[in-house]
């Protein structure tokens, strides 16, 4: 987290989601994108979620990334309360390795979209990269940093499997 006003709000249903969602935060840090993180459960703290989501745009946030497990209503409930783009990350380790949360997040009714990512750490990382790609459309310096991130990632992949 930086002193800069956060562009990305990372929300999650439980403190138990943070070990996964911290990969979102770490990836945003690598790209120099300011973020904030909050526990806001659709079921356990609905008033907190309502306040957070309805105030998010006026507070200057640009994108919300929501991680949740089990019934995983958080991303959809947040999307219903804000015009900002909402990306959803299903938590793993619950029923069928997180298939429950994946289906809950991806099966939104038409009219209120959630950008559903992969289950667990891959989705948490990619949510940050997808948010970065959207923000980079209006931020040339971030666009350069994202290009550099991807070039570095490519360079780190060995061509010969025996080099790993
Ligand atoms: C969901 O229930 C949370 O997103 C979490 O993934 C899941 C379990 O929560 P805890 O029982 O670990 O607090 O609301």
Image: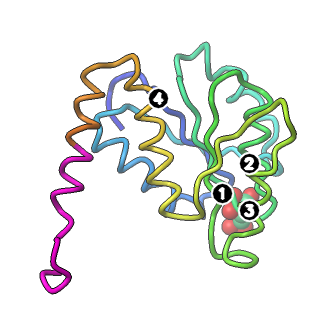
Q: Is residue 20 magenta-colored?
A: no
**Which region shows up in magenta?**
149-164
Residues packed near mark 1 inside 10 Å, few (<14), some (14 to 19) or many (20 plus): some
Helix, strand or loop at label 1? It is loop
Helix, strand or loop at label 2? It is loop
Residue 10 position, x and y percent, is: 54, 41
Instruction: Write down the quadrant of residue 114 in the picture.
Output: top right
In this view, the mark in front (2 or 4): 4
Residue visible at 79% across and 39% down? Answer: 77
Residue 32 position, x and y percent, is: 29, 34
Q: Quadrant of the C terminus?
A: bottom left
Lower position in the chain sequence, tag 4 or tag 3: 3
Lower position in the chain sequence, tag 2 or tag 1: 1
Residue visible at 25% across and 37% down? Answer: 147
Q: Is residue 158 magenta-colored?
A: yes
Helix, strand or loop at label 3? It is helix
Separation of residues labelled 2 and 1 (CA atoms) = 7 Å
Residue furthest toward the right? 109
For this view, does 26 lie left or right of residue 12?
A: left
Give the labeled residue for mark 1.
14
Residue furthest toward the left? 163
For this view, does 133 lie left or right of residue 11?
A: left
Separation of residues labelled 2 and 3 (CA atoms) = 14 Å
In this view, the mark in front (3 or 1): 3
Respond yes or no on whether mark 1 lies under 8 Å from ligand 1.
Answer: yes
Give the labeled residue for mark 2.
41
Q: Are marks 2 and 3 in contact (CB under 8 Å)?
A: no
Separation of residues labelled 4 and 1 (CA atoms) = 27 Å
């Amino acid at each position: 987290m930086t002193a800069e006003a956060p562009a990305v709000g990372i929300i999650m249903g439980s403190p138990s989601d943070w070990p996964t969602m911290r990969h979102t935060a770490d990836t945003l840090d690598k790209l120099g994108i300011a973020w904030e993180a909050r526990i806001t459960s659709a079921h356990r703290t609905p008033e907190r979620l309502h306040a957070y989501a309805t105030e998010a745009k006026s507070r200057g946030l640009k994108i919300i990334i929501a991680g949740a497990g089990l019934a995983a209503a958080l991303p959809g409930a947040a999307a219903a309360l804000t015009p900002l783009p909402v990306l959803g990350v299903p938590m793993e380790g619950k029923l069928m390795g997180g298939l429950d949360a994946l289906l809950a997040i991806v099966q939104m009714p038409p009219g209120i979209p959630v950008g559903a990512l992969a289950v667990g750490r891959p989705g948490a990382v990619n949510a940050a990269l997808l948010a970065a790609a959207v923000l980079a459309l209006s931020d040339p310096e971030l666009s350069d940093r994202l290009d550099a991130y991807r070039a570095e990632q490519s360079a780190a992949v060995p061509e010969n499997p025996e080099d790993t």
